[in-house]
Amino acid sequence: MYNILTLNKIAACGTDIFDKAKYTVSDNAENPTAIMVRSAKMHDMEMPESLLAIARAGAGVNNIPVEKCAEQGIVVFNTPGANSNAVKELAICALLLSSRKITEAAAWAASLKGTLDAPKTVEGGKSKFAGPEILGKTLGVIGLGAIGGKIANAAVALGMDVIGYDPFLSVNAAIQLDPAVKVTADINDIYKNSDYITIHVPYTPDTKNTIDEAQIAMMKDGVRLINLARGELINSAAVVKAIKDGKVAKYVTDFADDVVLGEENVIVLPHLGASTPESEDNCATMAAHELIDYIEKGTIKNSVNFPNAELAKTGDHLVCVLHKNVPALIAQITSVVSDKGANIENLVNKSKKDWAYTMLDVTGDVDADAFKSIEGVVGVRVL
Ligand SMILES: NC(=O)c1ccc[n+]([C@@H]2O[C@H](COP(=O)([O-])OP(=O)(O)OC[C@H]3O[C@@H](n4cnc5c(N)ncnc54)[C@H](O)[C@@H]3O)[C@@H](O)[C@H]2O)c1
Ligand SMILES: O=C(O)[C@H](O)COP(=O)(O)O
């Protein structure tokens, strides 16, 4: 039996994919084979010996110690693009919220309940909630991946001029961009020319405080900022100060902290970007398939710490070896097979930065412990 431990509520359409004859799925599973998680923080968690894989039902993996997992032979997956439409729609909503004083206006209208002549009062008071249209304005998009690319295209369709910045833009993401999106190689073009700026990059040590005092100083007066990616990407104190100074008109963020909460002209949402039934279903389904494929067939797809690889078993065994990406290691792995007099029918070796994955389709006997004793090997399974 394989045990799947859930650290957050995962949509049933995903957990239901696991065959009940082979898997248990629960939030208190012992000796888990795999973990399904959304935003639960895992950095201080002791990883169980039994753990083969973690599937993040979502995009951001900053809640998971990805490198520590690689060292322990634990494959970490995420679900690229599965919640991108949900975030795109919230970003369009945020663009409009940042312009039209909707939240303040609705709160004021609600406050009129019980007053004598609300219809007349609203007509008299509405002018203080006027705000600009987005048509013809410039939107800067930092990060043109699954989410940023969709937002850029949607903003073009809404009549905005769009400038995008992404120094690591994939070919796949690039070909999906509307030709009207102007891609710049200089992030300062975004800061200097945008009326609205939205950020959609992963949070890493390199991207912390991407937007800080110096970047805000370059921006147009009255700029509106949107952050549905991670709180740490924008320095909250710098934004609040810039709002008080009149430089930034509005900040819409999906990430609460004590600095932004309760501040005028800041709209704080409770991390709602991916919270649609459609996106929760997409993420849970993709995560479940990733885990089943890895557990049962050794296939890796959409891992953030090991390379994609798959190999069909035609011989007696499929040997799956997770290891460091260093010279002479594959030779040692194949020697372990030949030392036993077994034959390699097919072999796949893939690498991703410091880590690699070798799959061997073998006829004959194999000695799993001999692979494990190779320096640099962090995980071995014989299927
Ligand atoms: N609010 C939410 O609920 C919610 C939901 C989904 C994702 N997110 C956040 O949004 C992030 C992006 O998600 P995605 O699905 O678009 O991921 P993605 O991997 O498809 O896209 C990220 C893009 O950022 C680019 N990038 C990386 N570093 C950059 C940098 N320094 N400057 C500019 N671009 C850079 C990458 O090249 C990539 O194209 C996630 O990592 C996550 O933190 C939040
Ligand atoms: O990175 C993500 O996918 C989002 O932040 C969504 O997080 P959630 O799954 O906890 O809503």
Image (cartoon, rainbow, N blue to C red):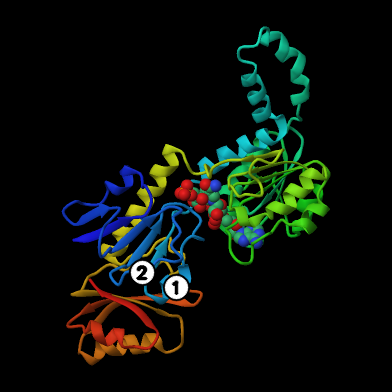
Q: Is residue 296 left or right of residue 102?
A: left
Q: Residue 27 placed where, x, y %?
A: 30, 53
Residue type at tag 1: Lys
Question: How busy is the neighbourhood of tag 2: few (under 14 within 10 Å), some, or many (20 plus)?
Answer: some
Between residue 236 and residue 324, name the one nearer to us: 236
Q: Which residue is mark 1?
A: 68
Quarter holding ligand 1:
bottom right
Tell me residue 297's x, y (percent): 27, 64
Quadrant assignment for the C terminus? bottom left
Quarter placement of the N terminus: bottom left
- Picture quadrant of residue 360: bottom left
- The picture places residue 318, in percent across and down from the top left corner, at 25, 73
Q: Nearer the viewer, residue 234 or 17?
A: 234
Looking at the image, which is closer to me, 179 or 248? Answer: 248
**Closer to the eye: label 1 or 2:** 2
Quarter of the rendering containing residue 280? top left
Q: Earlier in the sequence, mark 1 or mark 2?
A: 2
Which residue is at the front of the view, 328 or 118?
118
